[in-house]
Amino acid sequence: MDYIFIKSKKPGMEEFGSVYARVRVNGMNKKYAIGFTIKIKEWERYRSLQYTASALMTSAGIKYGQFASILSQIKINLEEDFDPNTAQSIIRSIKATVVNGEGFNILESNTKNKILLTDFMAKLMEDYNSGKRLKAEQSTKVSSGYIKGMNNVRNDIINFEKTHRRRVFLDNVTMDFQRDLVKWYKDRGILPNTINTRMARLRVVMRIAYEEKKTKCNDFRSTEFVPKQVEVDEIFLTPKQIQEFLDVDLSSVEKVKELQDKVKFTKARQKELKTINPERVRHLQYSRDIFVIGCLTGQRVSDYSRICQSMITQIDNIDFICLTQTKTKKKVYIPLDKRVSKILNKYNGVLPKQDFESMNANLRYIAELLHWTWKPNIDETRMGGKKGNRFCDMLSSHTARRSFATNAHAAGVPLSSIMAITGHSSEKTLKRYLKLHAEEKAIIAAKDFEGIIEM
C-alpha cells in the first residue's frame, strides 16, 4: 500500500488537501481516508523529510512525529492482514491511540532536527522508482528486485520499532542498535546469510544518509556492522530433478490450480494462492526456464539470466555459449545443452527479465507444487539453528550453479574442466560447491584409486 494526497477543490481551501491510504486489491485501488486535512506545504515537507519530529503541523494540530507514527502504524497493520471491512476502523483506532499519547514515544526532546530511518528509506525508494536516483556510479535505474529488497529491510525496521516501542532515527543507527537488530533477527529464526544481506542493505542506506549530511552517525563503517556470511550446507538438484522441474506443467492458471489442489500448503502459502492469475503463471514459467538454464550452464544468476541466442558460437562444429562473466570478467565457453537452446527459442532468443527476489519465491513455490517438501539432512547449527527447513524452502537461484558443479563432478568430470566453465579461480573454492551424498563420494573415490588398490 501507499499514501496519496488529494488537493481540495472547495473554494477557500486551495492550500489544503486530504491524505488517503491506497491499497491495491484484486487489480483495483481502494482508498481509505486517514482523517487529516492539511496544508499542501506541510505534506510536501513531510514527504521530502524536511521536518522536525517535534515541530507542529499547524493545520492538523499534531506534531510531525505523531503524523509519521500514525502513517507508519497504519501501513504495518493494513499490509499484515488487510480486510476491507475493518480497514477504516483500524485507521481510526491507530489515529486515536497515537494522538492520545499511547503509541510510540517519539516526542522526546532530543528528536529535534532528526530524521526517521524509515522515512529516509521510503524517500530513497521513491527516488529509485522514479529514476531520480540511479545505480551508484552508473546511468541506469536500479532493479525492482533491489527496491523490493530494500523495502523488506524497511518493513523489518518498522516491526523492530513495534516490538521495542521506540522509533529509530538516522542518528540512532549505532553499533548498539546494530546488536539489538541482529539479535531481533536471530530471535525470529532469520538465517545468518539473510541477516548479512539485510544489514548490508542498511549499510548502503546509512552511507547515503551520511554522504548527504542527513546524519553524523558513521558506525556503519565498522567492519562488524554487517555480520559475516557463514558457509552452510546447501541443497542441489539431481539431473532427474532438473528434468522434473523443466517438465512441470505451468501452461495455464487451470494447470497450476490442479497442482495446487494436490498439495497441503501452510497457512502463509494459502494466502498467496489467491494471487494466481495469468500474469503470475507467466512469471512462474519465466523463473522456471531461467533457473533450468542456470542448472545446465553453471553460471551465477547475474550471468545465466542474460544468456541469449547471440552468445551461441561454434568451435569444431560444436555449439558453445560464449559469455563474459559479470563478476570476474572471465570469458567462458559452455557446451550448449539442447534444452537451453529449446528454452531460448521459446523466447525468440532473449530471456524475459526477472528480479531475483521474486524469482526465488517462484522457485520455492514450484518446488512445493512438485511435493519437494522433505527435510534434507543438513547441519542445522550452521544454518543458524533454524530447524525444520524443507527442501522446497531452501531452493534459490544460486542452487542452479551448485547443482551444475555437483552433477558434473558426480559424473566424473575433472575439476579443471568444471572450473573452465564455472570460472572458479581455484579447486578449493569450487569444492565448497560440491554437495555429494556419501555413496557418490565413495564411487568417485574408488575411481581415483584405480591402479592403486585391486577391486
Image (cartoon, grey):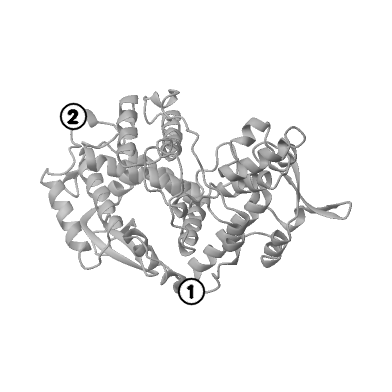
Instruction: Specify which label sits upstream in the sequence, 1 or 2.
Output: 2
The three-letter code of the residue at mark 1 reads Val
User: Farthest residue toward the left?
Assistant: 100
Q: Is residue 234 left or right of residue 104?
A: right
Q: Considering only vertical position in the picture, is 238 above or below 216?
A: below
The three-letter code of the residue at mark 2 reads Ser
Q: Which residue is mark 2?
A: 109
The local secondary structure at tag 1 comes to helix
Q: Is residue 117 left or right of residue 308?
A: left
* Mark 1–mark 2 CB contact (< 8 Å): no
Q: Which mark is residue 253?
A: 1
Q: Residue 429, position in %: x, y?
A: 62, 33
Residue 382 appearing in the image? yes
Circle count: 2
Q: Which mark is residue 310?
A: none
| Quadrant in the rendering for residue 171 | top left
Q: Considering only vertical position in the picture, is 307 above or below 436?
A: below
Q: Considering only vertical position in the picture, is 252 above or below 314?
A: below
The residue located at (42%, 30%) in the rendering is 227
The residue located at (37%, 61%) in the rendering is 269
Q: Residue 27 or 299: which is nearer the viewer?
A: 299
The local secondary structure at tag 2 comes to helix
The residue located at (37%, 48%) in the rendering is 388
The residue located at (60%, 43%) in the rendering is 139
